[in-house]
Amino acid sequence: MTDKRVVITGAGTVNALGHNVDQTLEAMREGRCGIGPLKVRDVERLAVQIGAQVQDFGAEQIFNRQQMALFDRFTQFALVAAREAIAQAGLNFHGDLSAKSGVVLGNSGGGMQTLDENYRTVYEDGKNRVHPFVVPKLMNNAAASHVSMEFNLKGPSFTVSSACASSNHAMAQAFQMVRAGMAPVMITGGAESMLCFGGVKAWEGLRVMSKDACRPFSANRSGMVQGEGAGVFVFEELAHAQARGAEILAEVVGFAMSSDAADIVMPSKQGAARAIAGALENAGISRDQVGYINAHGTGTAANDKTECSAVADVFGPHADDLMISSTKSMHGHLIGGTGAVELLACIMAVRDGVVAPTIGYEEADPECALDVVPNEAREAKVDVALSNAFAFGGLNAVLALRRF
Amino acid sequence: MSVQDKVIEIIAEQAVLETSDVTLESSLEDLGIDSLGLVESIFAIEEAFDISVPFNANEPTASDFDISSVASIVSGIEKLIAEQT
């Protein structure tokens, strides 16, 4: 059986830059920063007091009381993003389409807000009873399950957890299913909400978090800043999309995954390079077609130097011609949801010809001597864009999008 | 136990060595302590002396806490104890 072509026909998001795709892309074009003072309980006991939080989300106005009792914040983000994506695609799932289509979402921490609140209840407040829905609220697959329930998606649905690469691994699964003809449509992306006392406290321990700003590729970088939110997409078989006259945002042309098999936190250049080169091979595209890479770009010394070196190795002289930016400088690091929000920057590059900047860039780093699109977005015709994700645990996943 | 003896004990345990193998001139690298081992050692030091060590793995030279040798770590901790108590 020949491979099907896979296109994106809907996109949705909630993140620190906006409550939908238009707001988010506008913020990326303007190089706006979504990072600010963290508003969480007991923030004064945290060493890191900044984050890219979703502002004025208003969950109580979006969901009813019964839903609020069941939806952790990461599930709320996923549902709002899925509603936007599926509305844009204009799809209704029933009959054969419903039976075959599913949801694959990335997530790393599960319902961290629910865990944090309920640990307080039993450990800090000494209570011996918690709300009956703690388990269905905190499980990592809650978001994927609620999306499947709301939209009547009865095909393959599950959650992929590979830390910071979760969303890219999830979207790679969805892409494979549509390409193989298993499902005409897959809903995919990721969601995360770890910005709570326990979530940030755990991250502080590794001493890789910045206390002031996220400045990827800048010599004076001081670490990563955590964000929260979701990105959800409709991946659809091209013929299916064309038969119903759907608007096509971009084509997904390839992906690759690799494992460093080396260290639980330190990244490997070889592992990253194998994933990047593998995605090009899988997509059947040559190196010089790639105009933009949305970097993993965490703003840690370990990632940024390794990633730039891997890109230089894979692309050779063409590394100096392409653009590579880290939008984490604006929306923070969404951990298991990050690749999904970052795919929006790739769509903007190939569809709109606008490349999102790396903001907060102040000093050139000779070990990151690539065109990192410093501080201001740029207009450029981009044929192919890659999205990198390199997770703790040495798990790498790279996706390739092409202008349609 | 002196600050120096306690630091050497912590570093020796991290490096899986005898305390007699850890000298003041040793660097963490000489002792086979990697970046994760360093972060774990600093945590153990903070717990042992009830201090907060200003160390960010992204900019190890940004603070004046010098980790280049066991001796420099000991003097850095003595300074922090004096400042933070």
Image (cartoon, grey):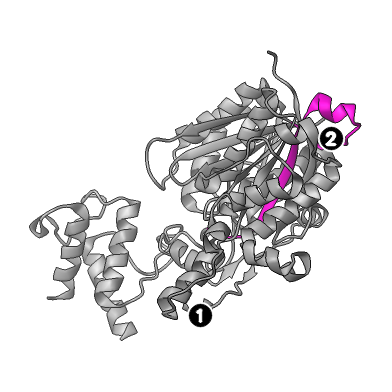
Look at 79% across and 56% down and name the residue there.
A20
**Residue at image mark 1:** A44
Q: How many neighbours does mark 2 have within 10 angstroms: few (below 14), some (14-19), or many (20 or more)?
A: some
A230 part of magenta stretch = yes
Q: Where is residue A290 in the image (x, y as percent from the top left)?
A: 69, 30
Residue stretch rendered in magenta on the structure = A224-251
- Callout 2: SS: loop
| Up-down relation of residue A337 to residue A292 (above or below) | below
Q: Where is residue B84 in the image (x, y as percent from the top left)?
A: 33, 83
The answer to whether residue A315 of the structure is visible from this angle is: no
A254 part of magenta stretch = no
- Callout 1: SS: helix
- Three-letter residue code for mark 2: Ile
| Up-down relation of residue A130 to residue A309 (above or below) | below
Of discs 1 and 2, which sits in the foreground?
A: 2
Judge from the rendering whether residue A207 lies leftward or rightward of residue A334; answer left or right: left
- Subunit that carries the residue with mark 1: A
Going from N to C along the chain, the mark reached first, 1 or 2, is: 1
- Choose between A135 and A345: the one closer to the eye: A135
User: Splitting the image into 4 quarters, where does residue A6 fall?
Assistant: top right
**Residue at image mark 2:** A248
The label on residue A67 is none
Q: Position of residue A98 (x, y in %)?
A: 75, 36
Look at 73% across and 48% down and name the residue there.
A356
Marks 1 & 2, CB-CB < 8 Å contact: no
Judge from the rendering whether residue A92 lies leftward or rightward of residue A116; answer left or right: right
Q: Quadrant of the N terminus of chain A?
A: top right
The Cα–Cα distance between marks 1 and 2, rounded to whole angstroms, is 47 Å
- Choose between A298 and A23: the one closer to the eye: A23
User: Splitting the image into 4 quarters, where does residue A14 fall?
Assistant: bottom right
